[in-house]
Amino acid sequence: MRAILSIIFNILLFVWTALVSIGGAPVLLGPWYWAMNAQNFWAWGLGVMIKYLLGITYEVRGLEHVPEGACIIAAKHQSTWDTILPHALLKNPAWVLKKELHQIPFVGWFYMRQGSIPVDRKGGSKAMRYMLGRAKAAKELGRPIIIFPEGTRAALDAEPDYQPGVAGLYKQLKLPVVPMALNSGLYWGRRQTIKKPGKIIVEFLPPIEAGLDRRAFMQALETAVEDGTNRLVAEGRAAE
């Protein structure tokens, strides 16, 4: 039954995404927050399916650590689920995404219109200036900026591989960075078709304030996210 429900969900994921992105395309002609609201609606619909089809619920801890206004959320990334939840928790999040995602018809256009921040590792200084320009625009609007410091989904228990992009944002934007740990990989693993019912735990950790040098910042961030994630994974396994 779990396999059947997972397959049904996977089909509905694509259908729902197509319906919202194609049917909602006219909002792309409006202000940026129209596209943001459409994405929030998309995430809400998926949240309903995840709860009732897959039996996956969630618990959030440490929201008091997320400051009002602009900040950087540096999150562990184990699952597609991690790209859905923040829409329910944060006001108008701006995502740091690979530029290739912006090029996907309709879906990418929504991300671009709502003010997400493209990363082009091969684009040189021009691409970096463009990325920072969009990040500063999000900061000026008081929006939280979400980045996955490893750049891609990590398999459960894999060795961490943090990329330097988060340090560049930290230095240039001079914003506090809130580490975010989670254990979503226990239930919705990387490249796994079959999802497991259970309760995902997400925890926002105390912010790293602006002003650290690059090495100290990266060490503090990796320690916070990895220690928090390992603790949540152990807690989830103990509850199974």
Image: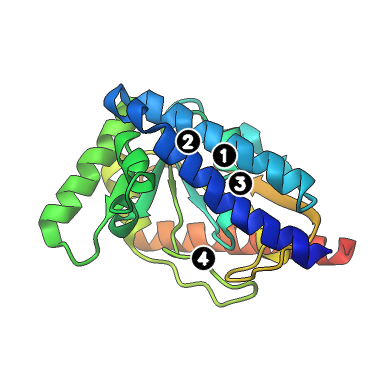
- Mark 1 vs mark 4, foreground winner is 1
Indicate the position of residue 99 as horizontal and vertical percent values: 28, 56
Indicate the position of residue 205 as horizontal and vertical percent values: 61, 46
SS class, disc 3:
loop
Q: CA distance from mark 1 to mark 4?
A: 19 Å
Q: Nearer the viewer, residue 192 or 179?
A: 192
> What residue does disc 1 label?
43
Indicate the position of residue 11 as horizontal and vertical percent values: 61, 56
Which of the 4 image quadrants contains residue 29? top left
Q: Residues within 10 Å of mark 4 (few under 14, many from 20)?
A: some
Residue 92 seen in the current view: no
* Mark before the other along the chain sequence, 4 or 3: 4
The quadrant of the rendering that contains the N terminus is bottom right
Amino acid carrying mark 4 in the image: Arg
Q: CA distance from mark 2 to mark 1?
A: 6 Å
- The colour scheme applied to this rendered structure is rainbow
> What residue does disc 2 label?
39
